[in-house]
Amino acid sequence: MKRPAIIVVCLAVVVLAATGYYFLHRGPAARDSMPGTAPALLSLLPPQAPYVIYADLEALRSSAFLNRLIALAPTPNEDPEYAEFVRSTGFDYSRDLDRVAIAIYPTAPLPTVVTIAEGRFDQKKIIAYALRTGKEEQRGGHAVYLLPSSTPGGEVTVRFVAANRIQLISHPQGNTPAFIQTSDPTGAALKERINRVAGSPLFAAVRMDAVPKDATIGSFRIDAITNSLQGVQWLTLAAAPQQQELRVVLEGECASSLDATQLNLALGGLRFMARGFLSDPHTRKQFTPQGAEALTQLVKQADISATGKRVQLAVSLTSQILDGLAAPAPPPRQQVPIKAPAGAAKPAH
């Protein structure tokens, strides 16, 4: 298997889910930030991480909206590699992974990603599967497992920290970070921001000054976004399912109230431009009718507000909007051959 299946289960799925929610953030919702207390799982992450993501999958699994979202996605069991992993370990993230906490550090040449996954694991089976492509080492009296990464120049270090918890660190090869045990949930400054969104089963917090200027997601340069957020010091995201909807609040904390006012006005201007763009008949032809209507509703319902140094973009993504965005594209129109009029001369060869 090219990618360690443990990473696929405990890291990629959650990061993709969090990323998906992040980009589905246009629609109406309330203006609060879903405050709460930082989950205990975050206390196992290293301190002062610039990026933190948390997902309570056990809570999210009971959401009708999330089940609808999962139904639209490809079935993981259709992947032969993942199916083999499930057969070998008995672990299936859709039923056995309950909570995940992730800390990301922008180290060079590859980022270091620390993940704590909580659920039901058969340690003997997972270790045996990991040793197919990895090796075991002893560090600080603990057994750890080094696995090859799908990213060139990277590797993954795995350790069982409890019967129901796995720690994974994806890092540059040959630069294995020490396992850090701390009772401080990522530092006082980040803890304050986390507490503003910790009432949600899915949230994230980002310290903007830690975002590398040349960072990319695939071929997309992050600075295309960060350049427009010069006055923003922190970004927090909170997402919570409510019956048939997904409630999302994205908040930017600025250096000053003036920066917040300018950002608020800029977002309002973008919303106005998007409405005009989507009202153009030529533009709407680029989407399916359902997709164009769903995008129109997202832009129309966007709720933007500013209070002090904070700007919020609050949304409510409905099943109807989700269905519209997921509507299959119409099949390409086939060219109908033009018949020559009866009696017309045939072209000479």
Image: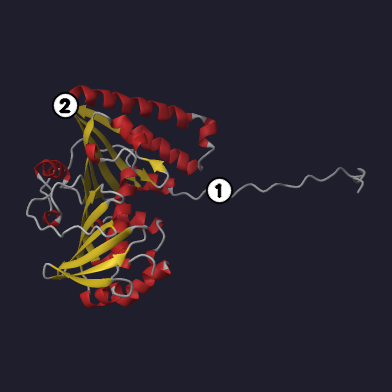
Please, what is the three-letter code of the amino acid marked with disc 1? Pro
Task: State which quarter of the image contains the N terminus.
Answer: bottom left
Q: Say which mark, if any, is on residue 308.
A: 2
Name the secondary structure under disc 2: loop
Q: Is residue 34 visible?
A: yes
Residue 204 x %, y %: 22, 46
Label 1, on which residue?
A: 330
Badge 2 amino acid: Gly
Q: In terms of depth relative to the viewer, which is nearer, 272 or 154?
A: 154
Q: Is residue 65 visible?
A: no
Of 129 and 331, nearer the camera is: 129
Residue 299, horizontal then vertical, whole percent = 37, 34
Q: Nearer the viewer, residue 240 or 45?
A: 45
Q: Is residue 148 left or right of residue 278?
A: left
Q: Would residue 159 appear left or right of 68 to someone viewing this image? A: left
Please identify the quarter of the rendering in which residue 26 is found: top left
Q: CA distance from mark 2 to mark 1?
A: 46 Å
